Amino acid sequence: MSEWLISIEGTDTGRQVALWLALFAAVLHAIFGALQKGRHDPWLTRGAIDACYGVMALPFALFVVPFPEPHMWPIFAVMWVIHIGYKVMQASAYTYGAYTVVYPVMRGTGPLFTIFGAYLLFGETFAPTQWLGVAVLLAGIYGLAVYNLLYLETDRDILPKALILALITGAFIAAYTTYDAYGIRATADPLTFLAWFFVIDSFGMPLIAYIHYRRMSDPPTLGPLALRGLIGAIVAIFSFGSILLATRLDKVGEAAVLRETSTVFAAVIGWVFLKETVGPRRLGLMALIAAGAVIVEMGG
């Protein structure tokens, strides 16, 4: 499969595959976010997910894909630091704010910063029509966050802290999206990067989750938590794997923008599974997000 992926880089086929990978990642990322915000404490859920996908990826890293080149280890080290910062900020934001409020803010901030990061690191540029699409998409995302803030949020006293954490999380999203794209392009075999990415990325959060678990006055039973971790790990592997491959096959900025249609899917998940209200205004804002993504893709 690696040979085929490498062969379509920079081609029209590669661009189409990147488009569908980014949209697939959007759906899965919304599911992933809901899993972390759902029944269990977000710190415990993230720790369980990371532990599971590290165990799942280890055999592939050791016995299936080629070993990483020596120059990849410093890249993996920086990647790990960025991802730990992202996970800590994300879990903190979910602790203080409602899912449908903090998720659009963090996801809306990420692609805007990523576009500038991709310009500085890869020399990527957007056409004027694509910038219009970005503006439409961000108007929908932040409009959704403001609407949820005005009508759905109840814990007003801790809301400012939740929003600040969400903005910081968005900056980390941009950092890891851009840097991970640099990493997967720096190795000869993209599947090598993916396998070792999940192994190395699994260190850190399970330990933090264990410490958090020991400090809880009423810790949950481990069976359901482990099951959520396993499901989340499968979703994470396909979600993050898809977007990383998309950033190798096509522009990083475009992939980042398309992935943020996950906000639409997140609103649907929040409505169906988390019992959060969805009305005509929110549907209209979600339509803006989808329209912005279409404009970005068509204008490229």
Image: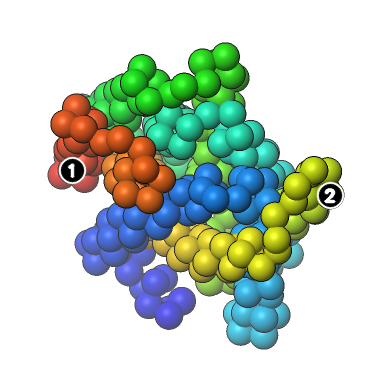
- The residue located at (43%, 80%) in the rendering is 1
Residue 88 in percent (x, y) is at 67, 39
Residue 105 vertical placement versus 260 (above, below): above
Separation of marks 2 and 1 at Cα, in angstroms: 47 Å
Residue 134 in percent (x, y) is at 27, 31
Relative placement, left or right, of 31 versus 213 is left
Residue 146 vertical placement versus 120 (above, below): above
**Residue type at mark 2?**
Arg
- The residue located at (59%, 68%) in the rendering is 227
Residue 213 in percent (x, y) is at 78, 50
Residue 75 in percent (x, y) is at 68, 52
Residue 124 vertical placement versus 182 (above, below): above
**Residue type at mark 1?**
Val
The residue carrying mark 1 is 294
Figure quadrant of residue 14 = bottom left
Relative placement, left or right, of 105 versus 205 is left
The residue carrying mark 2 is 214
Observer-nearest of 236 and 83: 236
Observer-nearest of 284 and 130: 284
- The residue located at (38%, 25%) in the rendering is 152
SS state under label 2: helix
Observer-nearest of 244 and 286: 286
- The residue located at (75%, 47%) in the rendering is 218
Residue 291 vertical placement versus 27 (above, below): above
* Residue 296 seen in the figure: no
Depth-wise, is mark 2 or mark 1 nearer the camera?
2
For label 2, the crowd category at 10 Å Cα-Cα, with few meaning under 14, some 14 to 19 and many 20 or more, is few
